[in-house]
Amino acid sequence: MDQSGEKSAEAKLIDYYPDYVKELPEGHPVRTYFMENFYIRKVLQEIAEMNIQQDFQKFFNLFNQLSEVEKRYARKENQLFPYLEKRGWNGPSQGMWSFHDAIRDLLRGVRKKIEIRDLSHVNQDMSLVRSEMLRLMSVEEMRLFPISLQMLQDEDWQQMSVGEKEIGWMLPQEPAMYASDASSTPPQSLEPPSAPAGRLRLDEGHLSLEQVNFLLKCIPVDLTYVDENDRVLFYNRGEERVFPRSAGIIGREVRFCHPPKSVGTVLRILEEFRKGTKSEAEFWIRFKGRVIHIRYFAVRDDKLNYKGVIEMSQDITEIQKLEGERRLLSWDEDVVV
């Protein structure tokens, strides 16, 4: 108890944990999920007790905090669910994801009303948000998390903890990283699983050389990779390139791959990238009646040593025409006359 006779937030949080969570070490992903649930309930309660119209700014701030739940759902979908699938449980991916999307839709609807200051029915909307989020958290705490702890191995949780950092959390402060008592290896330095025979292990996942080639051919973007010695190492051969390329440029100095009027600009980009003063450059031009977006990106290793440059060109003519949203498959809308 503190001097006011009330329990501290930390003590309340510990009381909130069921026994199976109290036994988990600090930083365990499930423990972090419970910290977020405690936080969500607190924000929902504050919103439920306030007059939204009279204290709109406070409500707006709280609503923005609540909307950070997207990070939590993204972690479940991209971290927890895949590990459960590997252990044979597909239910959460097939069922719980739809609950996430339903809540996302509700939050988007409230945000649209906030943007136009139409608050006449926001109380009812937030009441529905609250009931749906509480229902989902109950399913998590009574079923999802207990079963996950039974099914997954400690190495799964450690790898999951590393991946979660990339997505983020909805908590005001970043939680601790998880490392079990059985391992003194910091999670940040855990090695990814080795690739199956005949495949290349990448930073994320593994592919065969054939699949790498398929991937680079199908990307609707022109890519050219120039190494740290200004020699062209690679370009992708798509069906419709913006600018023509041929195998003759492989090994060629990049200065000889551009028309004289643009060589000076290209060399300046390479110089700034090599010095580390710049890492990106972009242009857009009109070429044969199309709008072309051209970007250069410096390539650096983990120690920030310069390893070359990627040139990326993309026809954005049709992209520029996009307006509003398209959330439904459009194939059936096409009519042949």
Image (cartoon, grey):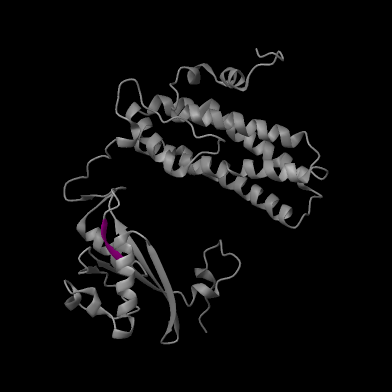
Residue under the image location 26 percent in, 39 percent down? 193
Q: Is residue 173 above or below residue 287?
A: above
Q: Is residue 173 above or below residue 104?
A: above
Instruction: Inspect this view and state whether residue 176 appears.
Output: yes
Using the image as rendered, state which of residue 182 and residue 108 is in the foreground: 182
- Specify the farthest residue to the bottom: 288
Instruction: Inspect this view and state whether residue 240 appears.
Output: no
**Principal secondary structure, stretch drawn in magenta:** strand
For residue 315, side relative to residue 6 (left or right): left
| Residue 9 picture location, percent across and down | 62, 22
Using the image as rendered, state which of residue 132 and residue 71 is in the foreground: 71
| Residue 8 picture location, percent across and down | 63, 19
Using the image as rendered, state which of residue 83 and residue 236 is in the foreground: 236
Residue under the image location 83 percent in, 43 percent down? 54
Count of marks overlaid on the render: 0
Instruction: Examine the image and state in which quarter residue 81 appears.
Output: top left
Magenta segment = 306-310
290 falls in the magenta region: no
Q: Is residue 46 above or below residue 334?
A: above
307 falls in the magenta region: yes
Q: Is residue 220 above or below residue 90?
A: below
Instruction: Examine the image and state in which quarter residue 298 appears.
Output: bottom left
Residue under the image location 50 percent in, 72 percent down? 319
For residue 33, side relative to residue 56 (left or right): left
